Image (tube, helix red, strand yellow):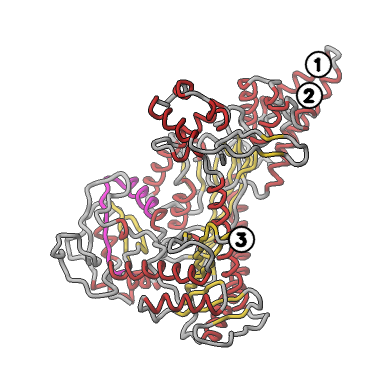
Amino acid sequence: MADPSSYRPKPGQIPDSPGVYKFRDEHRRVIYVGKAKNLRQRVANYFQDLANLHPRTRTMVTTAASVEWTVVSTEVEALQLEYSWIKEFDPRFNVKYRDDKSYPYLAVTLNEEFPRVQVMRGAKKKGVRYFGPYGHAWAIRETVDLMLRVFPVRTCSAGVFKNAARTGRPCLLGYIGKCSAPCVGRVTPEEHRELAEDFCDFMAGRTGTYIRRLEKDMMQAAEEMEYERAARLRDDAGALKRAMEKSAVVLADATDADLIAVAEDELEAALQIFHVRGGRVRGQRGWVTDKVEAVDTSGLVEHALQQLYGEERGDAVPKEVLVPALPEDTEAVSQWLAERRGSQVSLRIPQRGDKKDLMATVQRNAQQALGLHKTKRASDLTTRSRALEEIAEALGLDTAPLRIECYDISHLQGDDVVASMVVFEDGLARKSEYRRFQIKGFEGQDDVRSMHEVIGRRFKRYLQEKERTGEWEEQPTGTPADGSAPTGPVPGPVPAAAPATGPAEDTEPREDDGRPKRFAYPPQLVVVDGGQPQVAAAQRALDELGIDDIAVCGLAKRLEEVWLPDDDDPVVLPRSSEGLYLLQRIRDEAHRFAITYQRAKRAKRIRTSPLDDVSGLGETRKQALIKHFGSVKKLRQATIDEICEVPGIGRRTAESVAAALASTTPAAPAVNTATGEIIEEDDGGSS
């Protein structure tokens, strides 16, 4: 535990300007990021008597070993820089909301020639229009199925689309009228894009226009005695009305707003968001977080706004954001939201009427989510704690292994030998710390030798980190004789930078930038996938490096026995043991991660092309060549002058391409064993 007075800045050293500050621990990790209107006042608050600090704040300042800051021009810039640093450094003492699920969106790929309607999860892509999020994917598909009667937009994948275009036959949806079949030219690209834009307009809440138009066309068709057409228009209007009914009107004035509610206790907080577009609830999300810093409701709301809108632009930021409590600096947050939207954003607490009633509903959802989360977590936390205690007892460890690393070797008959390292902290996977290795020391199949190499490489990096930061051996103070930068951490604050609009330039080496590093922190336990030979190899690698404070064990698949170094007999954990179950889960995750990498590596090797050996020929020009000629086979038959006709290909490059293709032997033609058909080479694959 560090004494905050050991790194407290000198009086008057901290500026009284707006800015952002970072606390770092002894490993130079950034553990907390905060912003302030007045840096001097805010930072000084952390260095008062420890008894007067909130318990979480006290833990943070005693964990930290230094503090530094960056001055900015305005409070809005401070808000933006704080968000950027929290996202970049992932500080352990900052509130970070965890999405309780990966919510599906209804997406329209307007960035394609023929836009496609589909369900999407994960990060948003440029040029794609999103609606939602929805609670369930089936809710999206039901809505889309109803709307395709009126807006027959393409929903098929790229492979299905290309196959239909090649055969000249549309898919089933094209035959039953739920796709306009642009793949076979029934509509032009312009007509199909207009359909997609109408689909987006309807989903965005502009519904009345289309329904009135359908009803008008229906009446006109009936007057002209075109009863079949009138019946179809009637059914189309009904389908749109049923799609609208799936999201009931909650705000009568066609409001576009996000409503945010927070439920909290001393330890955790749950956040619920209702996305209202056109007066209808179009989506709902829920987040939960540990209150790892001393923060009130307004602070939780501010963190939520940063994470919710930090990556959004335009209409994704609504005109109105309703919250249970206003952030401390409401004006700066409102201005930041307005900059992201491109127009004014109203940030306020609903006081009366329908909006207040809807906020009460959102609040009830937040309370229920917090109760459900605490019920699950109580069970999970108890189970994980018991598992770690059982492992410590079985292996004779002094304390429970809060950080466990597991290693696995994967190969295919001695080829593409790789290894994986997975990390579990407090019994939970820490995927940002996973690492993959290629075996470089030798060729062929030797799992024991491979394990020795991987463990040696991993912990050699760990020792390098300790030596670089001055933890492994004493480092001289000041600048070394060779004129290089000091290797130890520099105590005290970093001088304030000039006003900035984004993250300040870090003058330290990149290894000391505070980002979580995969090799900087040692585990309490190393688990290897295998038996006595693999365990002995791992222990030998640690012994060679002089590391004697990390436990090693192996988990053999056949009988799920736990092996320890220098023991002739395994440790047998009961089949019902939570400790054994956790070790199995860690081992299986390491195996999954290793085999995924091995397969990807093998697939990449199989997909190699003779064009890969052409110096200076990048992926873009490779694709241009294949697209121009249609296949590697036809490119091999082309003359140098014909190759020069491809845009971006000069004569020297054309000569190199021709020489590379001439020096390789064409692959034997592939044959479809079911039909006897010879499959032509059609891409840049193996040749």
Residue at disc 3, secondary structure: helix
- Mark 3 vs mark 2: which is more N-terminal? 2
Q: What amino acid is labelled 1 in the image?
A: Ala
> Mark 2 and mark 1 in contact (Cβ < 8 Å)?
yes
In this rendering, which labeled residue sits more in front, label 3 or label 2?
2
Q: What amino acid is labelled 2 in the image?
A: Leu
Pointer 2 residue: 233
The answer to whether residue 149 is seen in the rendering is no
Which circle marks residue 658 in the picture?
none
- Mark 3 vs mark 1: which is more N-terminal? 1
Pointer 1 residue: 221
Residue 185 horizontal/vertical position (percent): 68, 21
Q: CA distance from mark 1 to mark 2?
A: 9 Å
Q: Is residue 106 above or below residue 63?
A: above
Residue 477 horizontal/vertical position (percent): 17, 69
Left or right of residue 581: residue 32: left
